[in-house]
Amino acid sequence: MRDFLKALPKAELHLHIEGTLEPELMMALAERNGVTLPYASVEEVRAAYDFDDLQSFLDLYFQGMSVLLTARDFEDLAMDYFQRAAAEGVVHVEMHVDPQAHLSRGVALEAVMEGLERARRRAEDELDLSTAMILAFLRDRPAEEAESLLEQAAPYLDRIDAVGLDSAEVGHPPSKFREAFRRAGELGLARVAHAGEEGPPAYIHEALDVLDVCRIDHGVRCLEDEALVARLRDEAMVLTVCPLSNLRLKVVERMEAHPLPAMLEAGLNLTLNSDDPAYFGGGMLENFLACQRAFGWSRETFARLAGNAIEAAFMSEARRAELR
Ligand code: ES4
Ligand code: ZN
């Protein structure tokens, strides 16, 4: 089964590129850039990754990315990840990027965009890996900051496929970002949003009603609302579920208690993704394997889930045809 899941062409639709920063690269970049981290070794970094909830993870996620300063750092970050992903059968990666987390540290948007662009070209050339980019708004920052980021991103719109909404969910409902998402639509960008990870099902309804999203990132709390489940199923709305993330952030207590099998049973349009692989214990293959161990799914089920992601991906029809 491992060989089958590894060989299965997988598209990753829910990934934060800053969440791919492995402790080894974090330490190397800290050294290269003269940044001080509160860790003496790679082992200490890993030992710190014992999270209670989303916020306790986000604190270390934002701290870890303090080593990313130059275009070269962002290129190294993404290329390092693209190589690992390709080696486990990933053929397409859609990366969320959090520019506000870099701008607020004095890192120019140009450094972020140039570095990531170089890595994307290399991924295409060297790894036959296609990529897309989702410009994410930090929902715990003011809505005006998101609107300003979108205007600053004007020179890079041709490299951006969609806007997204991430970071601390509870207390920051989708409606807060009505204007930024409306403007993104006007600029021709697709819309996705994290909803129903820690937040209530009402946030999923709101993301659909107010932000006009084409995908819901996570969405695992949808089962608490029967009418919502019917709506998601009827609209064939794509949900980008991240099993190991949900386990490590204690959205679920054990993998066996994950709502995925019930969501599948409900006829939802599901995909499997890794979210922040450097922090949550593995990439796409490990997420597929965790489901295999916990739910005992058949090859057909995994092939269907992988197929759902190819169909929902931001990629050319020519590329989609190639991967079908
Ligand atoms: C995230 Cl797991 C998760 N949830 C919300 N925002 C995020 N940013 C990076 N990882
Ligand atoms: Zn996420």
Image (cartoon, rainbow, N blue to C red):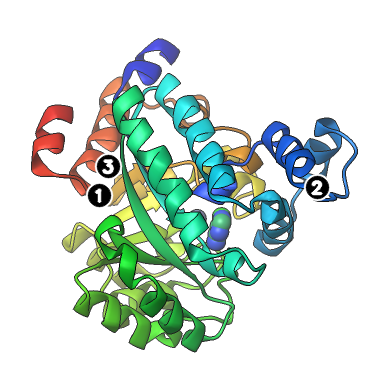
Secondary element type, mark 3: helix
Foreground disc of the pair 1, 3: 3
Q: Amino acid at mark 2?
A: Gly
Label 3: which residue? 309
- For the residue pair 212 and 224, the one nearer the viewer reads as 212
Q: Amino acid at mark 1?
A: Gly
- Residue 159 appears left or right of 52: left
Secondary element type, mark 1: loop
Estimate the spatial distance between the alpha carbons at disc 1 and disc 3, rounded to whole Å: 15 Å
Position in image of residue 27 (x %, y %)? 76, 37
The quadrant in which residue 317 appears is top left
Label 2: which residue? 34
**Could one spot residue 259 in this view of the protein?**
no
Disc with the residue nearer the chain's start (2 vs 3): 2
Disc with the residue nearer the chain's start (1 vs 3): 1
Foreground disc of the pair 2, 3: 2
Which residue sits at x=38%, y=76%? 150
Q: Amino acid at mark 3?
A: Ala
Q: Which mark is residue 267?
A: 1
**Could one spot residue 323 in this view of the protein?**
yes
